[in-house]
Image (cartoon, grey):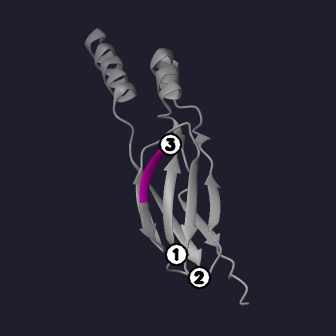
Amino acid sequence: MPGLVLGLVAASVASGCAAPERLVLSIESTPPGAHCELIRGNIQLGGMTTPGRVHVSPSRQDIQVVCSKPGYRDALFLIPSEEAGFEASDLLLPMASTMKSLKGHRNGYQTSTRIELVRVADR
């Protein structure tokens, strides 16, 4: 029995220290075909043409989405970082839970975003 408990604790510690999973964010625009850049802090995470998807790691920082398309005004959208809720493993290893929170591994983002572009007025 002590071996089983030790094995469960070791597995929990390993899962608490594992690299965070990658998240897939889907970005759509009206009209489609806009070029969008995703920025978190001062780091560019990637770019795409809408509709498209980008893979990001969890973080405590929000993501800025800047989209542009000829004939339309540039659009800026913020995808806020959201902290995940309580997990059962938090009871067994509160220190691992605290470390996950501090590193942003418990955070995520809404996975689907739609951005409306406004046509530039003809002169």
Label 1 Cα neighbours within 10 Å, binned few <14 / some 14-19 / many ≥20: many
Calculate the distance from the C-alpha at mark 3 to the C-alpha at mark 2.
28 Å
Q: Split into 4 quadrants, where in the image is the N terminus?
A: top left
Q: Which mark is residue 56?
A: none
Secondary structure of the residue carrying tag 3 is loop
Q: Give me the residue at 57% from left, 61% from top.
A: 66
Residue 51 location in percent, x, y?
48, 74
Q: Which three-letter amino acid code belongs to the residue tagged 2? A: Pro
Calculate the distance from the C-alpha at mark 1 to the C-alpha at mark 3.
22 Å
Asked if marks 1 and 3 touch (Cβ < 8 Å), the reply is no
Residue 119 location in percent, x, y?
68, 82
Q: Split into 4 quadrants, where in the image is the C terminus?
A: bottom right
Q: What span is in magenta?
A: 42-46
* Residue at the top extreme, as displayed: 2
Q: Which three-letter amino acid code belongs to the residue tagged 3? A: Asn
Asked if marks 2 and 1 touch (Cβ < 8 Å), the reply is yes
Secondary structure of the residue carrying tag 1 is loop
Q: Nearer the viewer, mark 1 or mark 3?
A: 3
Q: Mark 3 or mark 2: which comes first in sequence?
A: 2
* Residue at the front extreme, as displayed: 123
Question: Mark 1 highlights which residue?
Answer: 34
Question: Mark 2 highlights which residue?
Answer: 31
Residue 32 location in percent, x, y?
53, 80
Q: Give me the residue at 53% from left, 31% from top.
A: 87
Q: Which three-letter amino acid code belongs to the residue tagged 1? A: Ala
Question: Mark 3 highlights which residue?
Answer: 42
